[in-house]
Amino acid sequence: MSLRSSHLVFLIGSAMPVLAAGASGTLTIAQTVPLPDVKGRFDHFAIDTSNRHLFLAALGNNTLEIVDVAGGKRLHTIRGLHKPTGVIFLTPENQIGVANSDDGTFRIYDARTYRPIAQIDGLDDADNVRRDTKTGLIYVGYGGGALAVIDPRSWKITSRIKLLAHPESFQLETGGNRIFVNLPDARQVGVVDRGAGKRSAEWPMEKFHANFPMAVDDSNHCVFIGCRQPARLVILDSTNGRIVCDLAISGDTDDLFYDAKLKRIYISCGEGFIDIVEQQSPDSYNRVERIPTSRGARTAFFSPELREFYLAVPEQAGKSAELRVYKTAD
């Protein structure tokens, strides 16, 4: 890793392009899939890349919406959920896992028939879900501060890792055993040793608060944090938690993704923009575009395999909710 400067300042001028939807740029809108009768806000997504099936947690609607992206249509709706939040697609098992914040359940469904397979209780305010690709274990953030570790072979909780506050987005590094966890209520980023099953460090977020979305660039030892107060993208050195730099982004961010192929960061913001940030080096970043979307459209998903970015637009002003599919300009 290169030696990093402690004081890097980035100014974003008025010349930064604001591109209309569909205009030529880093993302180009390819299609829009209407989602009539879906009320309220969305939360997290997951994808089955082999079939191009996208799974959207419609939190305000208490449903999971399954969209056939290739066919440009809604394929199925799983009803009877209780504020669904985190979603995961389990590729080898061909199953879908859905965390429910209202009743504290993690529910598993067959991805072919959509029939329920199993249910795990006792996860109050269940939220984000991730899988360790090495061990196959599933991690669910929940409650006043914990990660539940779930074995998908038995669908049992094998352990619980205590945290200092409710976990928002968390990411598993691929080259090591750490989990980085956003803890906005504690004004920290927590670090977990998943091999030992316990906390190993806390990195303070003293100037930048409401840290919700997160992505990781393992190859350059970077952790990207989206903050709402103030609206900034904060880049941390993953070896020690030091803030490398920060730059202005649009307001009310909820999701961000790192595109390792193009060295770009895609940030969905409820203010009504997708912000595009280019990584010029591990220490240098520049916001190059703001793509107008719709106010409140802050939940998204990026598939590096399919080179597609998906944005959920909630129902508003009499217009139905919809899914917007963007292609990356590779």
Image: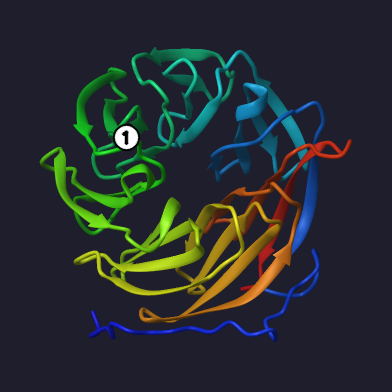
One can see residue 183 in this view: yes
User: In the picture provided, is 148 more to the left or to the right than 81?
Assistant: left
Image check: 291 left or right of 179? right
Picture coordinates of residue 57 (x, y %)?
Answer: 59, 32
Q: Nearer the viewer, residue 72 or 289?
A: 289
Which residue in the structure is indicated by mark 1? 139
Q: Residue at x 67, y 50 (%)?
A: 311
Which of the 4 quarters of the picture holds residue 306?
Answer: bottom right
206 left or right, relative to 198: right
- How packed is label 1: few (under 14 Cα within 10 Å), some, or many (20 or more)? many
**Circle 1 SS class:** strand
Q: Is residue 11 above or below residue 176?
A: below
Q: Residue at x 47, y 57 (%)?
A: 227
- Number of callouts in the render? 1
In the rendered view, tell whether residue 277 sits above or below residue 127.
below
Q: Can you tell which quarter of the image residue 151 is in?
A: top left
Q: Looking at numbered disc 1 in the image, what kind of residue is underneath it?
A: Tyr
Q: Position of residue 283 (x, y in %)?
A: 36, 81
Pick out the residue farthest to the left. Answer: 196
Asked whether residue 220 appears in the rendered view, the answer is no
Please determine whether, in this image, residue 116 is positioned above or below residue 219.
above
Q: Nearer the viewer, residue 169 or 24?
A: 169
State the quadrant of the N terminus. bottom left
Q: Position of residue 11 (x, y in %)?
A: 53, 84
Residue 91: x percent and y percent? 44, 37
Q: Quadrant of the C terminus?
A: bottom right
User: What residue do we see at 64% from left, 16% from top?
Assistant: 79
The colour scheme applied to this rendered structure is: rainbow
